[in-house]
Image (cartoon, rainbow, N blue to C red):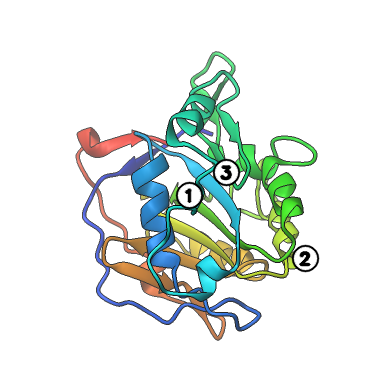
Amino acid sequence: MAGYVCFGALGFVLLFLLSTASGVEVKNLKNITDHLQNTYGVNGQYALGINVLDTYCTSDDQLDQNFLSQDEAGQVHDGMNSEERIYNGEELVGAKPKPFGDKGYNIHSEYLLLRGSDPSPMQNLLNKRKNGCTVFFTLNSPCVNTCSTPDGPHSIISALDMFKNHDGPKAFVFNRIWHYDRGSPLWENNILKIEERIPVYRCNNSGCVRCVTNKVVNTLCVGQKFFFPFSFFFEK
């Protein structure tokens, strides 16, 4: 359940039209993901989920001072650095990997938010606003070995069914492709499994890319195999 990802350069060159499966455009996804990373981001892997007024997704205006104003950055970081590694807020939930056992394993941040309890932190957040704009953001793509393979014991795929019943605009977003999954046919297949439940995007400084169009996975979301010196890796 532990792993490493690279800090290497990300090769985005295109910004695609963003839209949910229901046809409602997520016009502001880049602004939203930038705000999440700049305000709540921490060193190493983390995941965040939000459920806000749908107008934040359907308008491409700049975010106002009320966006996530009830979830102060210091409180979010305190929760993510607590023993449980989870923050449960008004419009935002967040998690960092949680150490497990004495062999250096981690319970992954995506698992903590989507499956870590019953109901999960993300399910509780969705229940607060049935028609809100919800974005699930993870810094690194959910790994094939643990999180994103549908039949795995620690898979998050079935938990993503919660988004099928959410009526508002929605997106599953990752910033980096986990190093060991770059170019993997298994990761490509798992992207399709996520897309069946919630639209998938990859966002970085160059923009946001819709990962699946007409059941074809964009290569920018899969990447190509390459290797970096060990010093470029950090623990997921």
Vertical side of 55 occupied by 163: above or below: above
Left or right of 16 in this view: 143:
right
Q: Amino acid at mark 2?
A: Asn
> Horizontal and vertical percent for residue 119?
79, 41
Q: Earlier in the sequence, mark 2 or mark 1?
A: 1
> Horizontal and vertical percent for residue 121?
68, 41
Q: Which mark is residue 165?
A: 2
Pick the front one: 66 or 234:
66
Q: State which quadrant residue 162 falls in.
A: bottom right
Mark 2 or 1: the one toward you: 2
Left or right of 102 in this view: 159:
right
Contact check, label 3 and label 1, Cβ < 8 Å:
yes
Q: Earlier in the sequence, mark 2 or mark 3?
A: 3
Indicate the quadrant containing the N terminus: top left, top right, bottom left or bottom right.
top right
Distance, label 3 to label 1, CA atoms, is 7 Å
Contact check, label 2 and label 3, Cβ < 8 Å:
no
Neighbourhood count class around disc 3 (C-alpha, 10 Å): few under 14, some 14–19, many 20 upward: many
Q: Which mark is residue 110?
A: 3
Q: Earlier in the sequence, mark 3 or mark 1?
A: 3
Please name the residue that numbered disc 1 is placed on. 138
Q: Amino acid at mark 3?
A: Glu
Name the residue located 35 percent from the left edge and 64 percent from the top edge.
223
Secondary structure, mark 3, is helix
Secondary structure, mark 2, is helix
Indicate the quadrant containing the C terminus: top left, top right, bottom left or bottom right.
top left
Neighbourhood count class around disc 1 (C-alpha, 10 Å): few under 14, some 14–19, many 20 upward: many
